[in-house]
Image (cartoon, grey):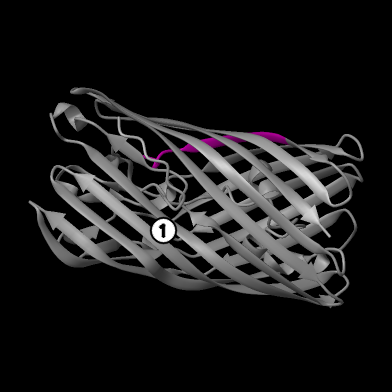
Amino acid sequence: MKKRPLIECAVIFCGIGFSVKALGTGLDNAAVGIKASVMGTAFTGIADDASAVHHNPSGLSFNDKDELYAQLYSHYQLIGFTRTGTAGKDESDEQYINPGLFLSKTYDKWAFGFGNYLPFGGGGFAFEDLEGIPGNDAEILLGLMAIHPAVAYRLRPDLSVGAGAFVYMGNYSQENMGYENEYDGIAGYGGNIGVLYKPSDKLSIGFNVRSKSSIKMDGEEQEAGIKYDSEIEFTLPYYFDLGFGYKPDQNLTLGLNFVRMTWSDTDKYKFTKLGTVETHLKDSWRMGLGLEYMMSDNLSVRAGLKYTNPSSDKKYLYAGSSEIDLWIWTAGAAYALNESVELNFAGLYNHGSEEHDSQKYKAEHFFITVGARFRY
């Protein structure tokens, strides 16, 4: 099995005969930020570190004044897909490393932040002799990395608004049965707007909208040794995030998040040579629960649970399918070396399975996250 580490990648599949079946939740990457990802991404209503740039930029203005917040992390991922059918079992086990960086600083009422991270992607797959057909090898890699500045303004002591604009840098490649393509470069633009309301010291409520984005990348397709200049085009959906944070006491923080994703906007995408392909996607949603408990002044433990609803009709399942009900369990710890540096370690287990007709599909992924958060 061919294994290739890739920083800028995401899950997308092109089936037999290069007919693209789905994009959807296979492309969604909710593992953004150190604290946020281990708390089940239940962070829209909390947003109390620099990764608020992505999750809810309005949270930046509630951070401590005149301090620089930063975080740097990396996910080491083991991505596994299995399909069992009449032709036997197809398996893909790949490894990827996906990094992220966030910075922010808060003044009297204004706050500014910056992120460089992967909001879409973080996986991929490669199959050999798919469906028992000798030489029917398939490999798909795609990723979108965001360059994302943001700003927030404190309207009142208990209310803040924020907004950001981002540029996606894209990378896509595909190989199957003598056909290849590859695209990269600036892929698209978008933005997000957020609100954070803290009616009391115990309760906070947040809302964040991430815009729909048109993605277009230049590259080339190659078939039978002949190369063609080419483009790939598709649409990324709106994200509507509603989150709640609750502190029953000073040592415990709880988070709850609901996200609606309009994947039906991604109804098709285009290749110059392959043409326009239907995606059969529908709107989907996910929900996350998270907690953080301060065991001491230096040690915190965090955990989360997340469920993602599939965005594709199950009759269009395929060997590398993430278009199934997915459950994600996370747990980790943070240790403060001093007032300025906090070390973080976490693990994530993502799993789901589905049976359709005589076939069974399974996704099973493991993440190990290491990183640090800083305050100066």
Quadrant housing the N terminus? top left
Horizontal arrangement in the rendering, residue 366 relative to residue 274 (left or right) = right
Quadrant housing the C terminus? bottom right
Is residue 54 visible in the rendered image? The answer is yes
Horizontal arrangement in the rendering, residue 91 relative to residue 109 (left or right) = left
| Range of magenta residues | 321-332
Nearest the eye: 280 or 141: 141
Residue 276 found in image quarter: bottom left
Instruction: Give the residue pinned by disc 1.
Output: 263
Q: Residue shown at 81%/45% (left/top)?
A: 253
Q: Residue shown at 88%/72% (left/top)?
A: 157
Residue 30 x/y as whole percent = 55, 49
Residue 75 located within the stretch drawn in magenta: no
Nearest the eye: 220 or 262: 220
Q: Is residue 4 above or below residue 218?
A: above
Is residue 272 visible in the rendered image? The answer is no
Secondary structure under badge 1? helix
Q: Residue shown at 89%/42% (left/top)?
A: 251
Q: Is residue 376 above or below residue 136?
A: below
Horizontal arrangement in the rendering, residue 319 relative to residue 186 (left or right) = left
Identified by mark 1, the residue type is Trp
Residue 329 located within the stretch drawn in magenta: yes
Residue 168 x/y as whole percent = 46, 66
Residue 344 x/y as whole percent = 72, 41
